[in-house]
Image (cartoon, grey):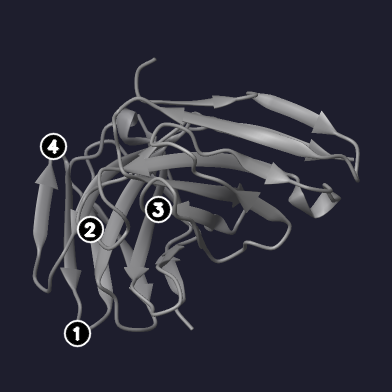
Amino acid sequence: ELKVEQNPLFLSMQEGKNYTIYCNYSTTSDRLYWYRQDPGKSLESLFVLLSNGAVKQEGRLMASLDTKARLSTLHITAAVHDLSATYFCAVFRMKTSYDKVIFGPGTSLSVIP
Amino acid sequence: IAGITQAPTSQILAAGRRMTLRCTQDMRHNAMYWYRQDLGLGLRLIHYSNTAGTTGKGEVPDGYSVSRANTDDFPLTLASAVPSQTSVYFCASSLKGLAGTNEQFFGPGTRLTVL
């Protein structure tokens, strides 16, 4: 069964600091997504990672994928308050009976001035 | 309409009642999805549709049904609501299905409370 874990679940960090959020999954996956959700809002797509070694960057966020380790990371560089949100990874696996996408529980990030 | 709209924004419903959550997109995306979001559980896929006229079951389909009569609309029906269906429901769409490489766009959500 495909399970997705995120670490940490809660993160409080100071502005200007760097940190990494980890996303582990239990079985082979076809691709991995990262999303951002602001409180009370909908989800916004950040990255789609398609293959082993994939790295994508947007502003202060950089995501990478290691399919052999079944691990994706979301690295935050020089955090700013605007990055405060909950970040979800989601793993997709194609099955014969139905396509399956499993979300992690989310990492709630709070950036403190 | 720009993007994905959902209706209603929120609803309080008595257990046993029938309820349809509406979702409309104007991006001409082929695929649409319904998720529920519960605290501590992230999002879970209920049903999906890779193209108009087809639907598929996700991770938690029991108690829900969907239809996809056309490209734009993807309603989610709770035939007989139960308190465990209290959740925030998000509709999403993508140009192609989950097997494609494209990102999903999410609607604003419907907060449903079943008493």
Secondary structure of residue under mark 1: loop
Of mark 3 and mark 4, the one earlier in the sequence is: 4
Spatial CA distance of label 2 from label 4 is 25 Å
Location of residue B77 (image quadrant): top right
Q: Who is closer to the viewer here, A76 or A73?
A: A73
Residue A98 horizontal/vertical position (percent): 44, 71
Q: Mark 2, chain letter? A: B
Of mark 1 and mark 4, the one earlier in the sequence is: 4
Q: Amino acid at mark 4?
A: Gly
Q: Amino acid at mark 3?
A: Phe
Spatial CA distance of label 1 from label 2 is 21 Å
Q: Who is closer to the viewer here, B65 or B53?
A: B53
Q: Do marks 3 and 1 both belong to one polypeptide chain?
A: yes
According to the picture, the residue beneath numbered tag 2 turns out to be B100
Give the label, 1 or 2, closer to the camera: 2
Location of residue A77 (image quadrant): top left
Q: Amino acid at mark 1?
A: Lys
According to the picture, the residue beneath numbered tag 3 turns out to be A88
Spatial CA distance of label 3 from label 4 is 18 Å
Q: Do marks 1 and 4 both belong to one polypeptide chain?
A: yes
Mark 3: give few (<14), some (14-19) or many (20+) Cα within 10 Å. Answer: many
Secondary structure of residue under mark 3: strand
Tell me if residue B84 comes above or below residue B74 in the rendering.
below
Spatial CA distance of label 3 from label 1 is 21 Å
Q: Mark 4, chain letter? A: A
Give the label, 2 or 4, closer to the camera: 2
Residue B54 horizontal/vertical position (percent): 44, 54
According to the picture, the residue beneath numbered tag 4 turns out to be A59
Specify the quadrant that holds the C terminus of chain A: top left
**Which residue is found at the position 79% from the left and 54% from the top?**
B84
Give the label, 3 or 2, closer to the camera: 2
